[in-house]
Image (cartoon, rainbow, N blue to C red):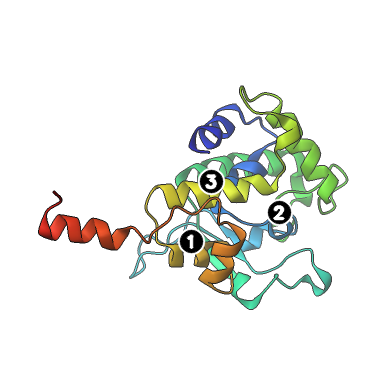
């Protein structure tokens, strides 16, 4: 899964900023499709105490009424540096292409017609990227795999389940464990590891 994530980042085209954001933040596709620029801060506030990093406010989705899946899904996520870089470039190109019609209330990822992307738009773009990735079968991967990869990468790198649950907007850690049981690295071994360290393993 780690190699797949790195592969995605290395082969992404100019059309795939959406995929970078999905992979590196774990946001649902239904949350990214209605995302507007006024919910993205690429600068943050480095002078604030505590510091406010660049962030994305996940407050809407394409669900009926625009609500997120659950109240816990409504969250504000700090943006990794790679996301800031690709979104800064994406915004500059979008502003240049749209000219005076560009607005910070506009969609971050509009379709060619300027409307919200639908699920088929996302699948087509995703398949185009997968085809360029060595060792990945496009038939076995869907946009949802980006969120699975996000969870797996964080778990493999030792992030606590509680924090992963908050980042993906689940109502509880039980939901995270149930949905991503194949991606979550078991943590029940931590007690035995600690005791071996304290008392010495034979």
| Circles 3, 1 touching at the beta carbon (< 8 Å) | no
Task: Determine crowd level at label 3: few under 14, some 14-19, many 20+ residues with C-alpha closer than 10 A.
Answer: many
Task: Quickly name the residue at label 1.
Answer: 164
- Label 2 – label 1 distance at C-alpha: 17 Å
The image quadrant of residue 86 is top right
The image quadrant of residue 195 is bottom left
Sequence-earlier tag: 2 or 1: 2
- Foreground tag (2 vs 3): 2
Task: Determine crowd level at label 2: few under 14, some 14-19, many 20+ residues with C-alpha closer than 10 A.
Answer: many
Residue 106 in the image: above or below residue 138: below
Q: Toward the viewer: 89 or 161? A: 161
Residue 60 percent location from the top left of the image: 70, 68
Q: Toward the viewer: 128 or 76? A: 128
Task: Quickly name the residue at label 3.
Answer: 83
Task: Quickly name the residue at label 2.
Answer: 29
- Foreground tag (2 vs 1): 1
| Circles 2, 3 touching at the beta carbon (< 8 Å) | no
Q: Secondary structure at mark 3?
A: helix
Q: Residue at x 76, y 33 (%)?
A: 139
Residue 124 in the image: above or below residue 80: above
């Amino acid at each position: 899964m780690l190699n797949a994530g790195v592969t995605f980042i290395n082969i992404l085209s100019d059309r795939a900023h959406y995929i970078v954001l999905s992979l590196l933040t774990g946001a649902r596709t239904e949350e990214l499709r209605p995302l507007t620029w006024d919910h993205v801060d690429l600068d943050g506030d480095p002078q604030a105490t505590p510091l406010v990093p660049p962030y994305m406010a996940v407050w809407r989705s394409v669900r009926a009424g625009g609500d997120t899946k659950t109240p816990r899904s409504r969250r504000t996520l700090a943006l990794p540096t790679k996301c800031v870089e690709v979104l800064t470039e994406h915004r500059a190109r979008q502003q240049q292409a749209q000219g005076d019609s560009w607005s910070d209330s506009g969609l971050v990822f509009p379709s060619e017609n300027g409307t919200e992307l639908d699920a088929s738009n996302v699948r087509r773009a995703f398949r185009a990227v997968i085809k360029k990735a060595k060792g990945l079968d496009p038939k076995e991967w869907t946009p949802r795999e980006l969120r699975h990869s996000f969870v797996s990468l964080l778990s493999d790198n030792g992030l606590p389940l509680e924090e992963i649950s908050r980042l993906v907007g689940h109502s509880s850690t039980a939901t995270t464990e149930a949905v991503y049981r194949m991606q979550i690295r078991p943590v029940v071994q931590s007690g035995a590891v600690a005791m071996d360290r304290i008392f010495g393993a034979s």
